[in-house]
Image (cartoon, grey):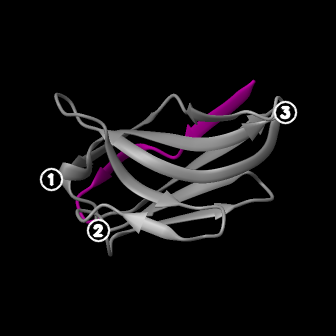
Amino acid sequence: QVQLVESGGGLVQAGGSLRLSCAASGDIVNIEDMGWYRQAPGKQRELVALITSRGSTNYADSVRGRFTISRDNARKTVYLRMSSLKPDDSGVYYCNAEVLDTEWVARVYWGQGTQVIVSS
């Protein structure tokens, strides 16, 4: 069993900042890609940012230059620093990780989500 637990969401005014965290735990041998996705009401879940095990990053065009993804491999944690937030950034943010577990099977796991609301 592998669990991903997000934290750090909340209500913030436009222009403000938040930092999300996602900690992985359980039967983990190695974690490959880790990422953040978001889903706004009535919309499909979309990729926000991705970071590989070697630290290469990729961002959605809508957040590039405002958001920063990072990871601490020793803590099995991925972060998303969000700045200059806009109301369109509101939604439920989900953590995602590709994990090689102790059964030596690579699976994709999701966190339960954390709500971000940006007020105008």
The amino acid type found where label 2 is placed reads Ser
Q: Which residues are magenta?
A: 1-15
Determine whether the residue tagged by mark 3 lies in a helix, strand or loop.
loop
Q: Report which residue position mark 2 lands on.
A: 84
Disc 3 residue type (three-letter): Thr
* Vertical side of 120 occupied by 68: above or below: below
In primary-sequence order, the first of circles 1 and 2 is 2
In the drawing, does residue 37 fall left or right of residue 109?
left
Magenta span: predominant SS is strand
* SS of the residue under disc 1: loop
Q: Position of residue 114 (x, y in %)?
A: 45, 36
Q: Residue furthest front?
A: 105
Snapshot quadrant of residue 105: top right
Tell me which numbered mark, 3 or 2, is placed earlier along the sequence: 2
Q: Is residue 110 above or below residue 23?
A: above
At a point 30% along the width and 61% down the height, the residue shown is 60
Residue carrying label 3: 102
Query: Please, what secondary structure does the residue beneath circle 2 have?
Result: loop
Left or right of 9? Residue 86 is left
As drawn, the label of residue 120 is 1
Which numbered disc, 1 or 2, marks the residue closer to the eye? 2
For this rendering, which residue is in front, 70 or 90?
70
Name the spot of residue 41 as percent of width and height, x first: 20, 30
The numbered disc on residue 29 is none
Identified at 80% across, 35% down, the residue is: 104
Mark 1 or 3, nearer chain start:
3
